[in-house]
Amino acid sequence: MKVKVLHKNTVDSKPLLDRTKGAVKALKIRTKVEEIVDNRQINKYGITHTPSLVVNDKVVLQGRVPEMQKIQDILIHEYRQSKSRN
């Protein structure tokens, strides 16, 4: 599973990065959370609001920072989706 947090390196972006890392750790997912701050890379995803969460190259969250439990729910859902496609 590929997990990325895209942001513009602002103070309000750090909580999404921290909570996403916490969710990955709590779920014992063997992956690293990639942090992307380069505007050109962010623009490739068509994102209009940051911070954003991208899982397996799919934008799953934009412009807000939910609680860690919601991030865990998103990761579980995307994991199941990826398994059903295989």
Image: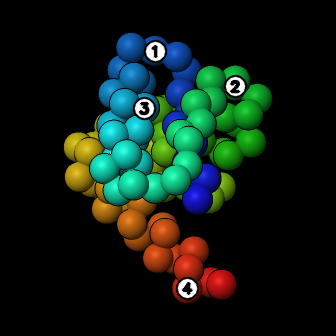
Of the numbered discs 4 and 2, the one sitting upstream in the chain is: 2
Helix, strand or loop status at disc 2: helix
* Quadrant in the picture for residue 35: top right
Q: Nearer the viewer, mark 1 or mark 4?
A: 4
Q: Report the amino acid beneath label 1.
A: Thr
The residue beneath circle 1 is: 10
- The foreground one among 44 and 34 is 34
Of the numbered discs 3 and 4, the one sitting upstream in the chain is: 3
Between the residue at mark 3 and the residue at mark 2, the CA separation in whole angstroms equals: 17 Å
Reply above or below: 15 against 70. Answer: above
Question: Whole-percent x and y of residue 59?
Answer: 55, 53
The residue sitting at 55% across, 21% down in the picture is 8
Helix, strand or loop status at disc 3: helix
Helix, strand or loop status at disc 1: loop
The residue sitting at 23% across, 52% down in the picture is 69
Q: Nearer the viewer, mark 4 or mark 2?
A: 4
The residue beneath circle 2 is: 39
The residue beneath circle 4 is: 84
The residue beneath circle 3 is: 17
* Quadrant in the picture for residue 55: bottom right
Between the residue at mark 4 and the residue at mark 2, the CA separation in whole angstroms equals: 32 Å
Q: Report the amino acid beneath label 2.
A: Asn
Left or right of 2: which side holds 74? left
Between the residue at mark 3 and the residue at mark 4, the CA separation in whole angstroms equals: 27 Å
Between the residue at mark 1 and the residue at mark 2, the CA separation in whole angstroms equals: 13 Å
Q: Report the amino acid beneath label 4.
A: Ser
- The foreground one among 51 and 75 is 75
